[in-house]
Image (cartoon, rainbow, N blue to C red):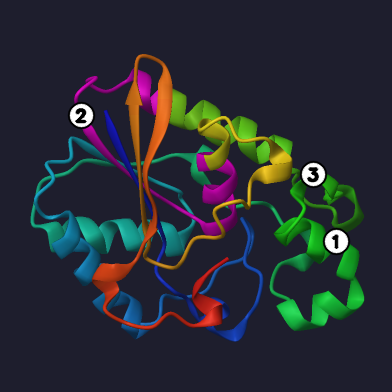
Amino acid sequence: MDLYFVRHGKTEWNLEGKYQGSHGDSPLLPESIHDIGLLAKRLSPIDFSHAYTSPIPRAKKTAEILIKDLHKDIPLTEVDGLMEFNLGIMEGKKFVDLEKQIPDVIHAFRCEPDKYDSTKIKAESFESVIKRSNDAVNKIVSQNDPCASILLVSHGAALVAMIQSLLGTKIADLRKNGGLSNTSLTHLKYDEGEYSLVKWNETKYLNKKLESTDTI
């Protein structure tokens, strides 16, 4: 089975450098609609049997536009387990401001996840996100044909934790391959109970130089 994980298109809050977790959201930028179209061209040779998305509007909208641009009849299902981290008091606040106010929490979240204390900001832990997202993906895998190609649309931080943990990566090493960019594509294969990485954070099809606000 081939699993294609897509991070949602860039939003207003992404551009402004604001955290937007499971309780925050902002509209996709006009340029994101164009980028999703480029992603559709990249994915056009693939026959997807099903698509799954986080129900948060920025991800769901990305999935809907992508399917429309693929010009294929692909069923789309919302899955709560694919939602972004609940980031507690961080949601809607700028990266630069929080780096000054709670530098230890921000550093741990972005660089040393095994030292992240989610209780300090009334947020969701890495362990919680990993469990719910892995349960969701494993259920999706069990419900589809072993030779199917599946599309999953989710969020930057959740996808890093989700995908790396599916690959067997320890929490301390979740950031070893870096982050994921808006409208990026990460490809895994699933065979006989094991996930393997084919491509991490593919963005070449976007034909542009990425900005610092594109990747988390």
Which residue is tagged 2?
148
Q: Earlier in the sequence, mark 3 or mark 1?
A: 1
* Magenta span includes 116: no
Residue drawn where x is 61% and y is 51% of the image: 176
Q: Which amino acid type is marked by label 2?
A: Ala
Q: Residues within 10 Å of mark 1 (few under 14, many from 20)?
A: many
Q: Residues within 10 Å of mark 3 (few under 14, many from 20)?
A: some
* Magenta span includes 162: yes
- Disc 3 element: helix
* CA–CA distance in space, label 1 to label 2: 40 Å
Q: Which residues are magenta?
A: 139-163
Question: What x and y, as percent, mark residue 112?
Answer: 77, 53
Say if 167 sits above or below 201 in the image.
above
- Disc 2 element: loop
Which residue is tagged 3?
114
* CA–CA distance in space, label 3 to label 1: 11 Å
Question: What x and y, as percent, mark residue 32?
Answer: 34, 76
